[in-house]
């Protein structure tokens, strides 16, 4: 442990002190994000900048609310470095995602400023931004400047667009939430499957081949909520040619399009796989259930967050370790799509320590910090900076099977527009302010097909009605 | 001169001593209720601070929403299912224990045990017992060829939530019923026995009518507690599968925190309170009638 800390500290300090930290190009769709005019001079090192700014601000502490998840925990473990440099203590509160979101809503909605920095998902951002709960980061950037080397261009257009509302940046990316398929190489080998499926038809064939021989073929999120069933299934919907809406323009959606043969077909396939090839009772499963099923050796395949790569291949907690293969999501008749969102650090609009919070947010999202976080012991395998994936530290930690190419190709596909059929829409799931309400109702209706309470056609029809069709 | 305190208006020094109690009561009950009421007249979405009022629109939306009525219906199913079994089983067992093990303190202590367990802990234990193929119960049932998806089929998920409530609180009902039974003197039973009544007839025609007001009070206590069921649903089903276990309180939570509809959520909270008060009023009226008869 102490060896690791020394290496990590050296890595961060060395890289920070190198000054300038010329950022490498971001993701494929990256671009934009010109350097602010008030950036410190080239000769000022990031470490010096943090030290001087910390002293100037004279803030004793800031409070932060985060999800109890690898992406936040990995940063938490490094936060002492920030405190050492700036003298700003970070009062860290970590709760499970739902509880943290509840607490954030109460804190931000009441304007109590209990937390200066909040961890949020891109799905929640439109709601938070529309209600005026978050500080305008473009403005903070203008008035407070930036840490040398920190630039939104590093994250890629796709990642930052998800955290913008009406062209204003409200959060800085700290995690990419995309999905790939994980499979058991030994099970595939035993069943004579030499190549992972590349279409949904092949996926169904593979399920039929491996199921029932001491293992279930597949597990998928099926609990009725936008972050569970809807997050996984929507890529299938798009691949079959379906969509939630007909059009997208200037942040607004038009024409409910969900009630379509493509939606029925994809939901029917999803439900069929769960009924025929998933463990008994897998029709109300959340991410915890799906990941547990894979790590306990119950299932041969899961479509899950790439962030679980480290967890699945960790011999300490996974029976699948050493036998984990990966492949990208299969293609459907309308092409290949991937689930995609990101998480970011936002700053409460009512924060009295906004400048200090802004300093922390930049430090936490520097490439060096994220590289150290990804290489650390927590297993945070999907940072939002593309360059991290090509670093030696990353390859060393996650270089099992074809995990790294699966992740980078998935991100590249996302950046090419493979997250939604709607042109110009940066969101995987509709990014309207009322989606938190609509999405829940739609999920519940879709869930009725998964549980067998309704046919796929009836569920899709009811879901479209919940959207106002 | 009596040393007992005299009835009547409290003196000024007594008011001073009572003041902290009223301040705490007002701060913890009256203020939140007023805040919730004010919020319910505000915008459907928006802020948690009281701002622009929207009149009765949230109430109109709520009363015309099929989802709210569905949640209320599920709450009614749960309440009827849980309370009927708890009271019938609890009172029946109490009658037996009262005859077989009268005044046994160990039994009474054991009976209290499930009721004092935190509901979230109970729910998590049941989750690991019943979940999919890996739950302990599910695993061994699967070994003998029974594949029952307890938590992921609408009917069985609701049945499990009711069963957990019954498991946890029937002993509490037994305990309260035993306490009520201590108020019946043996002379009454003996008199009935002398008149030729059997044990069943004594229980049905003598004992139960005598403790009826107490039984209604027990039902009321259980109702007030059961209507608030939340941790069990949160830990076990999150309202699913579909929305089949989205009882009124969980629906309220989803609306408020999941969909961030603060005004609408507050209106539903008012509905929960009104529904509870209405049912309690009915039970109190029934109790008064039972006492009078």
Image (spheres, coloured by chain):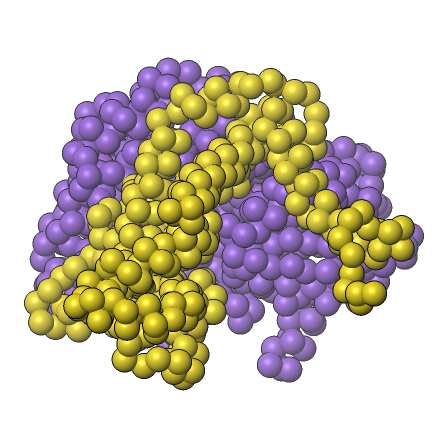
Image point (41%, 77%), residue name = B108
Q: Which of the image's four quarters has the N terminus of chain B?
A: bottom right
Which residue is more in the foreground, A353 or A300?
A353
Image point (57%, 51%), residue name = A100
Place of residue B81 in the rendered image (x, y in percent of width and height, measured from the top left): 28, 50
Which residue is more in the foreground, A150 or A128?
A128
Query: Which tint is chain A?
Result: purple
Q: Is residue B210 visible?
A: yes
Viewed as shown, does residue A329 lie left or right of A152?
Answer: left
Occupied quadrant, residue B244: top left
Place of residue B57 in the rendered image (x, y in percent of width and height, measured from the top left): 53, 18
Which residue is more in the foreground, B163 or A324?
B163
Place of residue A105 in the rendered image (x, y in percent of width and height, measured from the top left): 61, 41
Query: Which tint is chain B?
Result: yellow
Image point (43%, 74%), residue name = B113
Q: Is residue B258 visible?
A: no
């Amino acid at each position: 442990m102490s060896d690791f800390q020394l290496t990590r500290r050296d890595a961060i300090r060395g890289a920070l002190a190198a000054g300038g930290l010329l950022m490498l190009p971001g993701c494929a769709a990256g671009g934009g994000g010109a350097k602010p005019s008030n950036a410190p001079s080239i000769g000022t090192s990031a470490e010096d900048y943090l030290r001087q700014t910390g002293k100037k601000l004279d803030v004793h502490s800031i409070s932060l609310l985060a999800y109890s998840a690898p992406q936040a925990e990995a940063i938490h473990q490094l936060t002492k470095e920030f405190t050492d440099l700036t003298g700003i203590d970070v009062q860290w509160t970590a709760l499970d995602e739902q509880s943290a979101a509840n607490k954030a809503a109460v804190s931000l909605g009441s304007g109590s400023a209990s937390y200066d920095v909040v961890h949020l998902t891109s799905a929640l951002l439109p709601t938070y931004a529309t209600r005026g709960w978050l500080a305008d980061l473009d403005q903070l950037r203008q008035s407070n400047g930036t840490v040398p080397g920190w630039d939104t261009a590093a994250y890629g257009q796709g990642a930052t667009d998800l955290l913008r509302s009406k062209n204003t940046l409200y959060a800085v990316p700290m995690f990419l939430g995309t999905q790939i398929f994980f499979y058991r190489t030994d099970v595939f080998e035993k069943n004579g499957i030499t190549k992972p499926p590349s279409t949904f038809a092949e996926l169904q064939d593979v399920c039929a081949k491996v199921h029932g021989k001491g293992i279930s073929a597949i597990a998928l999120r099926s609990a009725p909520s936008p972050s569970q069933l809807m997050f996984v299934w929507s890529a299938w919907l798009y691949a079959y040619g379906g969509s939630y809406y007909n059009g997208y323009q200037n942040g607004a959606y038009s024409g409910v399009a969900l009630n379509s043969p493509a939606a029925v077909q994809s939901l029917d396939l999803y439900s069929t796989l769960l009924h025929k090839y998933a463990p008994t009772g897998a029709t109300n499963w959340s991410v915890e259930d799906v990941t547990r099923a894979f790590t306990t050796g119950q299932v041969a395949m899961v479509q899950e967050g790439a962030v679980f790569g480290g967890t699945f291949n960790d011999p300490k907690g996974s029976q699948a370790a050493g036998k984990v293969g990966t492949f990208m999501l299969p293609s459907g008749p309308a092409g290949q799509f991937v689930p995609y969102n990101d998480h970011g650090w936002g700053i409460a609009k009512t924060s009295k320590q906004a400048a200090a919070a802004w300093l922390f947010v930049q430090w936490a999202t520097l490439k060096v910090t994220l590289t150290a976080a990804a290489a650390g012991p927590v297993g945070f395998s999907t940072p939002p900076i593309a360059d991290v994936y090509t670093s030696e530290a990353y390859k060393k930690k996650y270089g099992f099977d074809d995990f790294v190419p699966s992740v980078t190709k998935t991100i590249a596909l996302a950046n090419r527009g493979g997250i939604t059929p709607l042109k110009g829409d940066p969101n995987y799931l509709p990014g309207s302010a009322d989606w938190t309400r609509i999405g829940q109702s739609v999920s519940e209706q879709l869930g009725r097909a998964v549980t067998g309470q309704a046919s796929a056609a009836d569920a899709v029809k009811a879901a479209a009605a919940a959207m106002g069709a | 001169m009596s040393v007992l305190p005299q009835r009547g208006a409290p003196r000024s020094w007594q008011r001073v001593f009572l003041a902290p109690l009223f301040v705490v009561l007002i701060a913890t009950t009256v203020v939140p209720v007023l805040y919730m009421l004010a919020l319910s007249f505000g915008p459907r979405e928006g802020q948690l601070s009281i701002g622009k009022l929207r009149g009765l629109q949230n109430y109109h939306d709520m009363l015309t929403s099929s989802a709210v009525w569905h949640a209320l219906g599920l709450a009614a199913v749960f309440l009827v299912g849980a309370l009927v079994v708890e009271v019938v089983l609890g009172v029946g067992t109490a009658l037996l224990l009262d005859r077989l093990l009268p005044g046994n303190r160990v039994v009474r202590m054991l009976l209290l045990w499930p009721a004092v367990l935190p509901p979230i802990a109970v729910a998590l234990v049941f989750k690991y017992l019943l979940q999919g193929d890996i739950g302990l119960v599910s695993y061994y049932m699967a070994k003998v060829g029974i594949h029952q998806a307890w938590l992921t089929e609408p009917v069985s998920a609701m049945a499990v939530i009711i069963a957990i409530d019954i498991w946890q609180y029937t002993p509490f009902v037994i305990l309260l019923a035993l306490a009520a039974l201590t108020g019946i003197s043996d002379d009454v039973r003996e008199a009935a026995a002398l008149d030729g009544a059997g044990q069943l007839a004594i229980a049905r025609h003598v004992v139960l009518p005598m403790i009826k007001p107490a039984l209604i009070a027990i039902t009321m206590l259980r109702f007030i507690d059961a209507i608030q069921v939340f941790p069990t649903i949160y830990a076990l089903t999150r309202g699913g599968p579909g929305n089949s276990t989205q009882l009124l309180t969980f629906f309220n939570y989803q609306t408020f925190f999941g969909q961030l509809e603060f005004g609408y959520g507050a209106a539903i909270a008012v509905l929960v309170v009104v529904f509870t008060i209405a049912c309690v009023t009915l039970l109190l009226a029934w109790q008064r009638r039972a006492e009078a008869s």
